[in-house]
Image (spheres, rainbow, N blue to C red):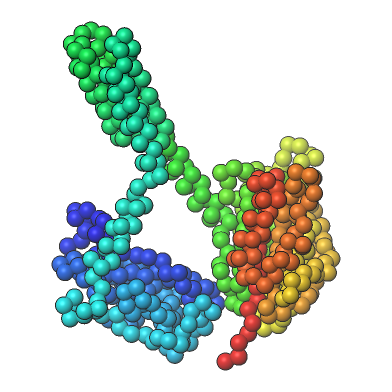
Amino acid sequence: MFLARPWAWRNQVWETDHAQAPVLVDVEGVARRSWITWLTDCATNVINGVAVTAVLTSRELVPASPQNLADFDALDCDDRGLRDVWEALVVTGCGEGGAAGCERSGAAAPAEVDLSRTSVQPTTWPSRQQHAGGCTVEDVGLTERITYLRESWRPGHALLVIPLVLIAVITALDILLPEDIFLGPLLVMAPAITASFEGPVLTGVIGLLAVTAQAYISLNSGVLTTRNALVQIGALAMLSALTVFFCLIREQRSRQLARVRSVAEATQNVLLRPLPDQIGPLRIASLYLAAEDEALIGGDLYAAARIEGGTRVMIGDVRGQGMSAIGEAALLLGAFREAAYQHADLPTLAAALDQSLSRYHADVEPYDENEARERFVTALLLEIPDERHISRMTSCGHPAPLLLSQGHAVTVPSLHPAPPLGIGDMGPADYTSDVFTFDAGDALLLFTDGVIEARNRGGDFYPLVERAARWTESPPETLLNHLRGDLLAYVGGHLGDDAAIIAIHRKPITSP
């Protein structure tokens, strides 16, 4: 990455590159992927320091890193969680990584990281001449440059052979065929075809080659200075220029559309934040399939909150689908993220969410009374204590989760559902908290009705219980990958309703 930058873009003293490590580190009960930053001496192209941080390294941290990165206090940083990540993971060599033991940090490490093999070490690097096995920018840069060239060559570039072959074949045939047969005007196909898969620059190059070929045909026939030949060459040049002009307009609109999509995706990601990979003793994976094209979210929702001694999770489904249901979904998500920490039990939390949604309906009163009566949200609230092998749940008109146990066993916990949220004034006494066993090694599968009501071409509902039983021993991410592929294949690639699934796996408690 460093060598790929133009010289004018580089610093004069040091340069830096970032990469996100494919390693999970436990930070206050949450698994986070750390960032690796390596520092390069621009005079010698030697990598003389490596930093590992919870977030992208700031400019204030970078200059201090080559001195002694193992001395965290020298960095004078108060970033929350950064100290734990630094003390739990340090990179000690080029292309080699190690996680530090917990002697200093006291933090628990996830199962993916072996903390017994390395210890915290300074990452000050010897010079290139002193360290024969050292790592320089040239060592890293060769691979980076090959990767950069490979990624910069788009598959569409291979299609350039088509217009080039067309130009060569048309030119050769026009020269070889009798003089009363004119194939030169067909050269306009070359820039026209190129515009369908390339930008204005390459389209202009192909257009220039086509005009040159037309001029060569006329020169070979001895008619280059005739009015007919000049008109043909001028017409081909004008058509090529118009093609390039429309390519420019298309690219401009494509960039505008890309910016709009980027803003829309960022907005949707803010509304429906991805769940962390790990919360306390729980490993979590989530899946969202929106029914509307180009949408990342719709009427389904989920959220998680880390409370004292446990974790609370909510999954819900707004009546309706797509973008029209996002308003209520956003309101309920915000209400849960605030109320989850304020209420002692799930029935009280459910009543608070119902009041928030009812106030929203009163403020945004629909014109149609029938529509007003049908505005509601089904939700399932879950509370999982860290120490006790149980789970509490309160259902507001939402389907019960599936409990996946070892040996391909799937059970449905007993559920006493209450009415959905937002249909009237409900108090804590109107909601029931059901308790069921959730042992270490088990997994919970939470879902919305878009999953179980999905139909195949024959009109049959998706058999979630039967399909989930195939992968009860898979980790959460693998389980959801299997379900996603199987569900989309079952419905023919497109869902009729938004669908959301959460897989929660309780890790076995290891004795110290």
**Residue depicted at x 48% and y 82%:** 114
* Residue 315 appears in the rendering: yes
106 relative to 10, above or below: below
**Residue depicted at x 65% and y 76%:** 506
The residue most toward the bottom is: 512
The answer to whether 304 appears left or right of 452 in the picture is left
The quarter of the rendered structure image containing the C terminus is bottom right
The answer to whether 303 appears left or right of 139 in the picture is right
The answer to whether 292 appears left or right of 46 in the picture is right
The quadrant holding residue 253 is top left
Task: Report how many numbered discs are placed on residues in the image.
Answer: 0
356 relative to 157, above or below: below
* In front of the other: 134 or 411: 134
Residue 289 location (% of width, % of height): 63, 52
454 relative to 185, above or below: below
**Residue depicted at x 82% and y 67%:** 415
Residue 134 location (% of width, % of height): 24, 76
Residue 262 location (% of width, % of height): 46, 47
